[in-house]
Image (cartoon, helix red, strand yellow):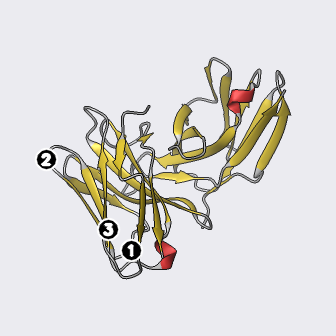
Amino acid sequence: DQQVKQNSPSLSVQEGRISILNCDYTNSMFDYFLWYKKYPAEGPTFLISISSIKDKNEDGRFTVFLNKSAKHLSLHIVPSQPGDSAVYFCAASEGRGSTLGRLYFGRGTQLTVWP
Amino acid sequence: DSGVTQTPKHLITATGQRVTLRCSPRSGDLSVYWYQQSLDQGLQFLIQYYNGEERAKGNILERFSAQQFPDLHSELNLSSLELGDSALYFCASSARTGVETQYFGPGTRLLVL
């Protein structure tokens, strides 16, 4: 049962433009969300996170938006650079209970930024 | 570099065998998490240890076990290996437990022949 879904397996964007990666979740108990970037032969690298008490968090070129009513979050990268080409994973966590701390991951979106 | 180290990077073994994967968390981190990434299942949580104690369990098979030692490094033991156990195994660490960022190691690629 996939509780975190990334429905676009791939996204291709021109350098300098905006990249928008989307993520949907089904579990209303999730209250902390993260985005990770992964290059081949490396582990996932933490990018940015957002708590459910916020609807937006920015860090440089990266902004994450959270729409709790729609159970949807998105990652915006502006401007996109060729070095951003990687697989991006959305992850979510519950803030309480026996699964505290466990991350649920989406399947990932391969972002390709071309010159 | 996340500060989380994993050894070995690659492991090739035969069905029925047993292997041990090792993880050293970031300095000061008390929690260690193990994840499996396979082609058909994506990244799946296996188990978490916090300061030496098992804290949460996910989709971990009975043939698999883990432990966290007093120096906080962790080992994941996989036994009676099957072809389907071939995957990337990632370790992650965080400062405490609960809702916080986890930092991942480079992974161990296991191939069972």
Counting residues from the start of the chain, the first of labels 3 and 1 encountered is 3
Q: Which quarter of the picture shows residue A112?
A: top right
How busy is the neighbourhood of tag 2: few (under 14 within 10 Å), some, or many (20 plus)? few
User: Residue at position x 81%, y 27% from top?
Assistant: A18
The kind of residue on which mark 2 rests is Pro
Same subunit, tags 3 and 2:
yes
Residue B66, horizontal then vertical, whole percent: 27, 62
Q: Which quarter of the picture shows residue A61?
A: top right
The kind of residue on which mark 3 rests is Val
Counting residues from the start of the chain, the first of labels 1 and 2 encountered is 1
Could you tell me which chain the residue with mark 3 belongs to?
Answer: B
Mark 2 = which residue?
Answer: B70
Could you say whether the residue bearing mark 2 is in a helix, strand or loop?
A: loop
The kind of residue on which mark 1 rests is Leu
Q: Nearer the viewer, residue A106 or B27?
A: B27
- Give how far apart the Cα atoms at labels 3 and 1 are: 14 Å
- Give how far apart the Cα atoms at labels 1 and 2 are: 25 Å
Could you say whether the residue bearing mark 3 is in a helix, strand or loop?
A: strand
Can residue B90 be seen here? The reply is yes
Same subunit, tags 1 and 2:
yes
Could you tell me which chain the residue with mark 2 belongs to?
Answer: B
Mark 3 = which residue?
Answer: B19
Q: Nearer the viewer, residue B91 or B59?
A: B91
Residue A91, horizontal then vertical, whole percent: 56, 46
Residue A66, horizontal then vertical, whole percent: 66, 36
How busy is the neighbourhood of tag 1: few (under 14 within 10 Å), some, or many (20 plus)? few
Mark 1 = which residue?
Answer: B61
User: Relative to residue A97, is residue B61 depicted above or below?
Assistant: below
**Quarter of the image with the N terminus of chain B in it:** top left
Residue B83 as seen in the image, left or right of residue B22? right
